[in-house]
Image (cartoon, rainbow, N blue to C red):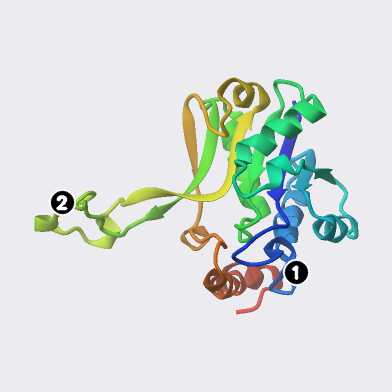
Amino acid sequence: MKTIAFIPVRGGSKSIPLKNIKPFCDKPLVCWNVEALENCSLVDEIIVATDSDEIEQVVTSRSYRKTRVYRRSEENACDTASTESVMLEYIHYANLASDTIFMLVQATSPLTQAIHFTEALQQYAFGKYDSMLTCVRNKRFFWNADGTSLNYDYRHRPRRQEFDGLLMENGAFYINTVRKILQSGNRLSGKIGIYEMPDYTAFEIDEPDDWQIMENLMRRHVLTEVTGSK
């Protein structure tokens, strides 16, 4: 059974122009996920789906072993196109086998490491779930607009260490099979499982202010592990 990691990256980001190849901690943003996936032995092939010559050049200029560039259609690279539309476009183009494991990976979550992909795919391999997504545990107290508490009893405020909180989707990656994606037209379907990621992966890069926050988190939680520095 083959496992494909699929990274959709458009050239036309309005909030941060060409953000997917803008240097993030001295490396083009998209390359962080590509390289983490290159180091995940459970991933057979990595597809970077883009409409941009600049993004293609950045990816192909590096000596990646498992990574290929797919030129997505203009129709599925516009602001209104869904991620599912380009997923389905590629699945049909490549004529993927129905039992292929298809992992959608978001370049805007560069703190995802090879161990996260590996652990999630191992969890998926047990066969308990049809599809999976990544979440982080949020221990904030939430309220409804009508003044009622959503996830705790304000009369008995729990201590943080005794509070389970809520699981929040962090958008890092999603796992499904080609068959189920074609049947549902969605990245998630059937019985859905959750791979819980560390707190520091809660952020995604969408706006300029996110950039500095994420770089600080990368240096603190990821790069220190790589370099062994404190």
Furthest-bottom residue in view?
A: 230
Q: Earlier in the sequence, mark 1 or mark 2?
A: 1
Q: Residue at x 64, y 41 (%)?
A: 104
Q: Quadrant of residue 62?
A: bottom right
* Disc 2, SS: loop
Q: Nearer the viewer, residue 161 or 28?
A: 28
Look at 48% across and 31% down and name the residue there.
Answer: 192
Which residue is drawn at the image coordinates 58% and 33% (left, top)? 124
Foreground mark, 1 or 2, reads 2
User: Does 203 sit above or below residue 89?
Assistant: below
Residue 87 lies, in percent from the top left, at 68, 36
User: Quick one: label 1, few (<14), some, or many (20+) residues within 10 Å?
Assistant: few
Q: Nearer the viewer, residue 95 or 227?
A: 95
Tell me where residue 210 sits by quadrant. Answer: bottom right
Where is residue 167 drawn, in percent x and y? Answer: 39, 48
Q: Which residue is mark 2?
A: 146
213 relative to 13, above or below: below
Vertical relation: 113 (above or below) 85: below
The amino acid at mark 1 is Lys
Mark 2: which amino acid?
Asp
Q: Which mark is residue 27?
A: 1
**The residue positioned farthest toward the left in the image shown:** 155
- The residue positioned 61% from the left and 58% from the top of the image is 108
